[in-house]
Amino acid sequence: MNWKIKLRAFFVLVFTLILASCGSTPQPVVELNTNLLAKDELKLGFVYVSPSDKATTHIYGAGCLLCYGVASALTSKLDTHLESTITTEELDNIKGLVLSSYQKRSNNISMVELSQPINKLKKFKGELGYAKKDFRPLKESLGIDVLVVLEIHQYGAFRSFSNYIPNGDPQGYLSGLLYAIDLNTNAYLQYLSIDEKIQPSGEWDEPPTFPNVTMAYYQAIENTKHKIKTAI
């Protein structure tokens, strides 16, 4: 198990909880206006943001370092399995699905590369329905009107804890975002949150291959694909 990754994930979780406590309203779903994409003059760019870490068990609710250490120890064998066997192949398939689905709606979409990470863009002060980062300068630099973004944040398994006590079994897990932004206004033309958690069928603690957790992960992948197909 990679303890550096686990420790970093813990501090990311703490920071996320602090932000959540501020009471900000989450961005609701924005359904895609497919008629807009049919305009021949509209140029679209697509970018994929891959996860920063390997597949692992993502722990939530272990609110102190000691609790997190205990929780990590309980999932260590599963982590080893996920990190060594779960590749990014299915994530690449999701990327391909998003691109092909948009290509069915628009004749003018292509992959683009950003000159800097999205989190380095300037903040945008807007209401719900607008991106928190200012994507508008990309209209000129990339020569496009709409930017489509697929971000995969975490993949593998999810397990909830109350401090160091598990609330349940590990679940198959995939999280991320799919969104499209009007580069004239910075408004969302589509916003879809990906948060798939699938309960394993049967016993989960079956090292070294953990077949039921692994199957639950691939079911989370399939559910995400269906969600994307329905949304585009």
Image (cartoon, rainbow, N blue to C red):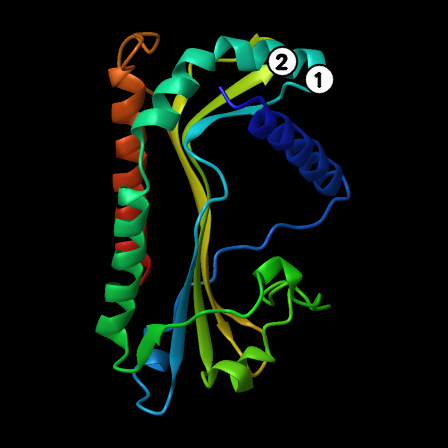
Q: Give percent across and percent down for residue 22.
A: 77, 43
Dot 1: within a 10 Å radius of its alpha carbon, few (fewer than 14), some, or many (20 or more) residues? some
Q: Is residue 173 above or below residue 128?
A: above
Secondary structure under the numbered disc 2 in the rendered image: helix
Residue 115 position by quadrant: bottom right
Q: Which mark is residue 179?
A: none
Give the residue type at disc 1. Answer: Leu
Residue 230 in view in this figure: no
Residue 187 position by quadrant: bottom right
Q: Give percent across and percent down for residue 41.
A: 35, 92
Residue 94 in view in this figure: yes
Q: Give percent across and percent down for residue 204.
A: 33, 11
Q: Give percent across and percent down for residue 168.
A: 47, 13
Label 2 – label 1 distance at C-alpha: 6 Å
Along the line of sight, which residue is nearer the eye, 164 or 193? 164
Give the residue type at disc 2. Answer: Gly
Along the line of sight, which residue is nearer the eye, 203 or 227? 203
Residue name at image x 30 percent, y 90 percent: 40
Residue 213 position by quadrant: top left
Q: Which mark is residue 69?
A: 2
Q: Tell me, yes or no, whether the two marked residues, 2 and 1, touch with CB atoms within 8 Å.
A: yes
Residue name at image x 53 percent, y 83 percent: 141
Secondary structure under the numbered disc 1 in the rendered image: helix
Q: Which mark is residue 65?
A: 1
Task: Give the quadrant of the C terminus.
Answer: bottom left
Q: Report whether 102 appears left or right of 139.
A: left
Residue name at image x 58 percent, y 25 percent: 6
Q: Is residue 153 above or below residue 113?
A: above
